Image: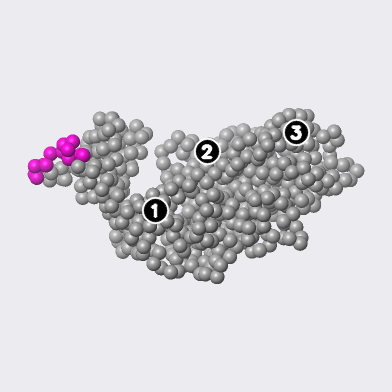
Amino acid sequence: PMIEVFATFVLTGFLCYTPFGALTLRMTTELLASNSFSSLCIVVALCCTCYTVPATLTIFHNSRRSLPKKLKNLCALAPLAYVPIASALPNFGKRAAMDASATATTKGFFLLGIEITPALVAAACLFGIIVVVTFFVVSTLVGAYLRSNDPNRPPVVNPKTFLGSSRLFTFLEFSKSPLKCITRLHNDYGKVFTLNMMGQNITILLGPEAQEPFFKSSDDVLSQSEVYGFMKPVFGAGVVYDCPARARQTQFQSMAYGLRNSRLKTYVGKIERETQAYLDKKWGAAGTVDLHTALSEITILTASRCLHGDDVREQLFEEVANLYHDLDQGVTPLSVFFPYAWTTAHAKRDRARKRMVDLFSGVIKARRAETPEESKAKNRTDILDVFMNAKYKDGRGFSDDEVTGLLIALLFAGQHTSSITSTWTALFIAKDPSIMSRISTEQATVFSGPEGAGRPVTFDDVNNMPLLHDCMREALRLHPPLVLLMRKVMKDLKVTADGRTYSIPKGDTVMISPSVGMRLPSVFPNPDTFDPDRFSEPRSEHKTPYAYLGFGGGMHSCMGQAFAFVQVKVVLSVLFRRYDIEVVPEELPECDYEAMVVGPKGDCRVRYTKKAVV
């Protein structure tokens, strides 16, 4: 039934574009009712006949020619005609409504004496295939020709190919490894080029000069909301990318207020205690452990303590962690294109978010019921408390649903990035004996007082670890968790690279790749080598504007980067002062480019031995 429902939505969306859509829909339901594979193949072929109008419109899309607004609206709304019918059919046992919609067209065929036979179906299949191939080729070639004739447009990747085969191969290559694909295209086309992905023109920008407009342009020129709307089911309505610019600014200001230095100072002790408790419970004196798994667990423990507060960490952590897992697993590559598709992962995601709102609503209610004296005595510094007291410009406070959504957004932004960054940083340090020795010396220098390495970490200590800081920055340069950043072009955009200016039209998507941009030899010499000293004087290779993208840049740079540095450096400081670490595999793991947030893929085991004096 689930497959049939999904098929109904997909098929009806295509079928209603043609004058014979109703008849084809009737034939489709009859064929699918037989539940045979051959019938399903015939249905797919029949759908091909309905691509005529969309394929024609693709010519306009690829050439960036504008269509009359009424025609655009009509084409966009056409598929909605059958949605009520489709949604009323959990399986194909009920076909009365669909049959009624096909009556008029069916009578026309009967009047012409045309009988629906296997031969007619076969002819429709052949015609459909011919139509699809013809219009696909025509739309690709004509659209690419019109676009490539504009001298100000960026070069188009593989604009003229037989049946779009090279475009398909490029898409498959990109899906498997964006880093290798973009690197190859950069060598062939330069620092600015356009490729077509899923019918959308995407322009890649590489290098500090080309990347500058990406980070400096305002939301009315380059929009985040248009490309990250698929996160709405996770964050919720009216949160971050699903709210007006002014409301989003207020939400971001509240986040920034909760992550200012005065609060970060209070988080240092909490992060250290959580890390020590985890190591005492899980590690012991010696052993072997998957470092990525361990640091992921430590990251969510410390984040919950700092962001959610002591009451959530101590009473609800296990359930919140399980719910977060379901939310996390509910964001897949399919979600980017179909965020509301009927999948098991999406169903768990939606249930988890609803339960998360219920949990935090209870916490908020309990906190609001406290007397001023009780609240003051607890001296809360968590982000939940900040959101509870935040207000929009009109005086309205954040709703429980919005507070929950913002907490989820912060956890999403920090959990993967901090756990991945701490893992890569630790692996790179442990793999290089010379750097490991320097890190040990730095830690011994910082904790050289009478209490030695066993005294609590302070905020000043965290800021007095320049080598560990640079190791973290270098790990982010080599392996940024977010390998692609996107914006929708809302107004024509000018981009300059190597002395040439390009015009990127409204409606395109622009994309940068921190993974590729931070490995350009012209920006970072010996880019594939782990070299934390590249950030210190006199080299300071990162100081070229928009060269280093570890935390984004410009007006949309990551506001949580200060918290990330504190969190990762405190965790690794505790780890390296307590244990001698040795990487088990001979080679470091590869990157998992199949994941939404790219982390290590493979063997992350380390051997650890507790030091004699801590």
**Mark 2: secondary structure:** helix
**Image check: 215 left or right of 279?**
left
Q: Secondary structure at mark 3?
A: strand
Residue 174: where, in percent of width, then height?
49, 48
Q: Secondary structure at mark 1?
A: loop
Q: On the picture, is 377 further left or further right than 342?
A: right
Instruction: Estimate the x, y position of residue 266 in percent, counting from the top left.
Output: 74, 47
The answer to whether residue 368 of the structure is visible from this angle is no
- Front-lying residue, 137 or 355: 137
The residue indicated by pointer 2 is 329
Disc 2 residue type (three-letter): Gln
Badge 3 local density, few (<14 within 10 Å), some, or many (20+)? many
Which residues are drawn in magenta?
A: 110-122
- Distance, label 2 to label 1, CA atoms, is 27 Å
Q: Which quarter of the rendering shows the C terminus?
A: top right
- Is 498 placed above or below 350 here? below
120 inside magenta stretch: yes
Circle 1: residue type: Gly
- Residue at the image point whose x is 28% and y is 30% from the top: 36
